[in-house]
Image (tube, helix red, strand yellow):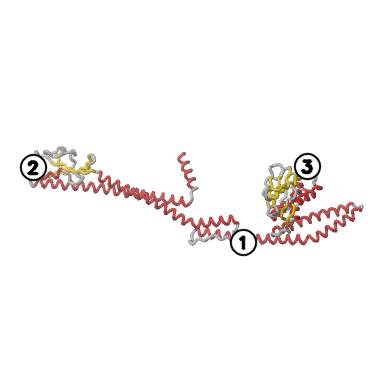
Amino acid sequence: MNGLASLKRLYARSRRLPVRLRIAIVSATLTAVILVGFAAVVGRLVSDRLEADFDDDLQARATNLANSAANDLSAGRAIGSSSMSSMTTALSSDGQVRIVYADGSAPGSLPTGFGAPDPGTISRIGIYDVAAREVLGDNSLIESGSPTERLYLQYARPHAAVGDTIGRMYLFLGGGVLVGTLLAGLAGMAVANRAMRPIAALTATAGDIATTRDPSQRIPQPESDDEVAELARTLDQMLRELDAARTETDETIKRQREFVADASHELRTPLTSILANLELLDHALADGVDEDERAAVGSALRSSKRMNRLVGDLLLLARADAGRVGLQADCDLAQIAQEAYQEVSPVLAGHALSSDIESRVLVHGNPDELHRMVLNLLENAIRHTPPGTGIRLELQRRGESAQLVVDDDGPGLPRGMESQIFDRFVRGAGPADRTTRNGDGSGLGLSIVRAVVLAHDGEVSADSAGTGSRFVVDLPLAEA
């Protein structure tokens, strides 16, 4: 089980290696296995051939020497005389010869040392391989010899010579296996690099598209017509379709924004007229006695004001979407914040409002839009917290920025809304939220805050640590 677990871990680690390296390793491993098998077979065949050649040469030399000895005897030359002394020494640089009887003893003064002869076979004695042949002839000519005893010639050569040759052969084969494995690994890496080059180009282009979010870029097409080329064509077609879909969506959104802007602009004039007439009618009925009529006019007036504000909000957002901003100039954000503070003071609905506003904080912007921004932040805190909640408005200089903060000690933002609180038509659903119950609020207040902040090159953020909410706006100070 431990071995299987180790193999699984090794396999898992290998899966994390780059594809190029894995291809090179597999190529080198397969080549090594093939070369090792080839070297083993070749080494075995060559070793057997060398051993056989060595044995054949040993037997042939022994036969030739035995025949020469027999010829000497037939010619009347006694073995052991001065004419035959050369045969008792090395016949080559590594060969040795002995003349012995069947029991291994040497006739006369001839040297011995190989033991009893075994004709027809090769004996291994020490470091020598020994071949023996019977010497046919008149043994009586041998010094102290007997004509009834058989003579044998033993020829010996050290086996180390062929062993050294076989060793060098295996060393050469081993070196060939190592070199072949290395070359196979390098070749595998080169082939993998070439094969992965189109994939690398696809990856680089995909990374650029992910960074720039621009699907109009084209995928590079490989010159080959293989699976990678098919993948590139498929991805390129997908990007074309995505680009076309995005273009259609952008055009649709653009037309919707233009419609909202045009409709909002066209509604401003009749709404203004309706508001003016309703205010006059409400004033005229102030001394009347018909309470139902006064209630109806008051309700219509309140609804018209909400409609007028909603139209104004939509028009402001439409201008922001189109990149159009109101006339900007240096203005005192402290004065704007103070005016918004005073404007909401009569409608606190039981909230405790306080402020800490630093004097004369100049920013470059549109005063009306900045006023709407501060007012929306304060109204958002009032609407989404229960009575008795403390709300604090702060404005301070922070380096090169003016920092405006609106925080409260209410129940905080609903969980999961931090990332979408500034989106359009998003309304709270917490226990203290009154806008979703009484229909007040359009869900555009904080989206207008963000639009105004972005139009003034600022930043806005919302944070809720479980208790209370904190909205922070940073705007660049006006240049001195």
Amino acid type at circle 2 is Leu
- Could you say where residue 288 lies in the image, as x and y percent from the top left? 91, 53
Assess whether mark 1 and mark 3 are in contact (beta carbons under 8 angstroms). Answer: no
Of marks 3 and 1, which one's residue comes earlier in the chain? 1
Mark 1 Cα-neighbour bin, 10 Å: few <14, some 14–19, many ≥20: some
Q: Which mark is residue 141?
A: 2
In the displayed structure, 110 sits above or below 320; it is above
Of marks 2 and 3, which one's residue comes earlier in the chain? 2
Is residue 80 or residue 123 the one in the foreground?
A: 80
Tag in front: 3 or 1: 3
* 306 left or right of 197 in image: right
Is residue 344 or residue 418 the one in the foreground?
A: 344
Residue at the image position 26 percent from the left and 48 percent from the top: 50
Of marks 1 and 2, which one's residue comes earlier in the chain? 2
Secondary structure type for disc 1: helix
Q: Which mark is residue 244?
A: 1
Residue at the image position 44 percent from the left and 55 percent from the top: 190
Give the residue at mark 3. Answer: 388
Amino acid type at circle 3 is Gly
* Residue 467 quadrant: top right
Secondary structure type for disc 2: helix
